Image (cartoon, rainbow, N blue to C red):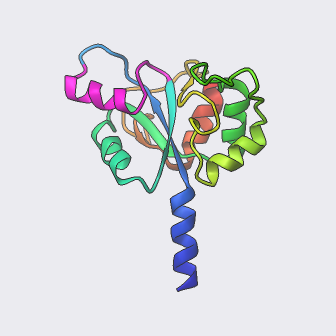
Amino acid sequence: MEKKNKQETKEKNSLLAVVRISGLVKVKEEIKNTLDRMRLRKKYTCALINASDKNMFGMLKKVKYYVAYGSIDEPTLSLLIKNRARVDKSNKEHEKIKINPEETAKELMNGKSLKQLGLKPFFRLHPPRKGINSKLQYPKGVLGDNKKDINKLIERMI
């Protein structure tokens, strides 16, 4: 019984990194709206979602042919925050916010959101170094569920 509770809390607090791979051309309106709700408005934008959120997971299933996603680990998350996080200027106290990547990554893993920490809810990334096969599903390409390999992809895009 205790193992099950620990596993549920671990799954609750796990984050999925979602990176938009496809561009804007010839994307259906329904898919565009879903990507917009996930804050993936441009190519090579990354958003973090909670793995236990059923609504977000349903949206993720809908757009799996346009994005790469997987479970992000804490070192990659702190590197992402260090290099690509931006302070949300709509917050009135944005000048006082100092970003400590390690602490921010731990707070995100414990269930806080980027908005609560005063950061923008998405990250703008570079195109991946050494390229990607952007039209094929995951073992041959990058689309769909990349599991732990999303960390390698994000490190190439920082």
Is residue 88 depicted above or below 115 in this figure?
above
Q: Which residue shows up at 29% across the image and 13% down it?
A: 25
Magenta stretch holds residue 34: yes
Q: In which quarter of the image is residue 31?
A: top left
Q: Which residue shows up at 66% across the image and 40% down it?
A: 77
Asked whether 97 or 134 is in front, the reply is: 97
Is residue 24 depicted above or below 68 in this figure?
above
Tell me, yes or no, if residue 35 can be seen here.
Answer: yes
Magenta stretch holds residue 132: no
Tell me, yes or no, if residue 73 can be seen here.
Answer: no
Q: Which residue shows up at 59% across the image and 39% down it?
A: 116
* Quadrant assignment for the C terminus: top right
126 left or right of 142 in image: right
Outermost residue on the top side: it is 25
51 left or right of 79 in image: left
Tell me where residue 121 appears, x and y as whole percent: 53, 31
Tell me where residue 48 appears, x and y as whole percent: 52, 39
Is residue 82 depicted above or below 113 in this figure?
above
Outermost residue on the front side: it is 92
Tell me where residue 36 appears, x and y as whole percent: 35, 26
- Part of the protein shown in magenta: 27-44
Q: How many labels, in total?
A: 0
